[in-house]
Amino acid sequence: MSRRAAVALAGFCCFSAIAHAQATAGSGNAKIPDTIEQRAAACIVCHGKQGRAGSDGYYPRIAGKPAGYLYNQLINFRDGHRKYPIMATLIENMSDDYLRELAQFFSDQHPPYPPPQTTGANAEQLARGQQLTTKGDRAPACIACHGSALSGVAPTIPGLIGLPRDYLLSQLGAWRNGSRHSAQPDCMAQVVQKLSVADISAVASWLAAQPVPAGAQPAAAAAQKLPLACGSASKVVVK
């Protein structure tokens, strides 16, 4: 199945799950419990049980991500700063408090990570990806913001390990071509503009190939100053 077909199918499943829940609620046959687990049911259709990520390599793991980061992204989808119609439609009528509750729920989930991907990158590409990620070159190293273990930094910086190569490529590419935005100053947009297409591929391949240590969690809030001013990392978006 192609990625486009997989995305379309997942979107159909999301809406089907919601429609089924609405129909069941109105039928009088069963009362749907008002729990956070039930509210999150539509999310796991694409993002996997507990938010551990789907198997298609496109939908990211949201389990264990910093709650502030997840909340910011939900706000961005709802308010049009990130463009993905399925997400926008699912949450368009959700309040800030509702989104904050969903973000905290998935942040509190810690299912095991899958084995690292075999990406097909050669040794030269992987070495370049490691250099850019851990030392930088023209742009700051990824570890300068995302933490020395690349597992993220609370409350708003996400981890990079454990994400599929295709998802990393799509998001880095979206920042590079201007279709994804973050709060100003948009540090990620500045970083990726300094990277070539080959560099982005190398970084995504190296990250996807890294095993995730047992018990990996976002680091505590960093004491040191970030290498770039970063609007999305400096505060949690609150409308």
Image: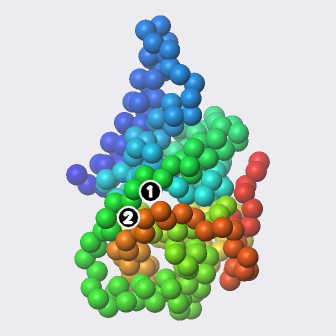
Q: Which residue is mark 1?
A: 60
Q: Secondary structure at mark 1?
A: loop
Numbered disc 2: secondary structure: loop
Q: Residue 195, percent across and down?
A: 50, 84
CB atoms of marks 2 and 1 within 8 Å: yes
Give 75 or 136, whichever is nearer the viewer: 136
Tell me if mark 1 has few (under 14), some (14-19) or many (20+) residues whose alpha carbon lies within 10 angstroms of its own. Answer: many
Tell me, yes or no, if residue 42 can be seen here. Answer: yes
Residue at the extreme front of the image, as rendered: 215
Q: Position of residue 187 (x, y in %)?
A: 65, 74
Q: Residue at (53%, 55%) from the top-left corner?
A: 64
Residue 16 in which image quadrant: top left
Task: Give the labeled residue for mark 2.
Answer: 164
Tell me the amino acid under the disc marked 2: Pro
Side of 87 relative to 10 (left or right): right
Count of numbered circles in the view: 2
Q: Nearer the viewer, residue 239 or 70?
A: 70
> If you read the primary sequence from the N terminus, does the residue marked by circle 2 or circle 1 appear first?
1
Residue displayed at 57% across by 44% down? 105
Question: In this orientation, does residue 197 appear?
Answer: no
In the image, what residue type sits under mark 1?
Answer: Pro
Q: CA distance from mark 2 to mark 1?
A: 7 Å
Q: Residue furthest top?
A: 28
Q: In the figure, is residue 69 to the left or right of 41?
A: right
- Which quarter of the figure has residue 148? bottom right
Q: Which mark is residue 209?
A: none
Vertical relation: 29 (above or below) 60: above
Depth check: 181 or 154 in front? 154
25 w.r.t. 143: above or below:
above
Query: Is 134 left or right of 59, judged from the image as shown?
Result: right
Residue at 48% across, 53% down? 110
At 32% across and 91% down in the image, what residue appears?
A: 124
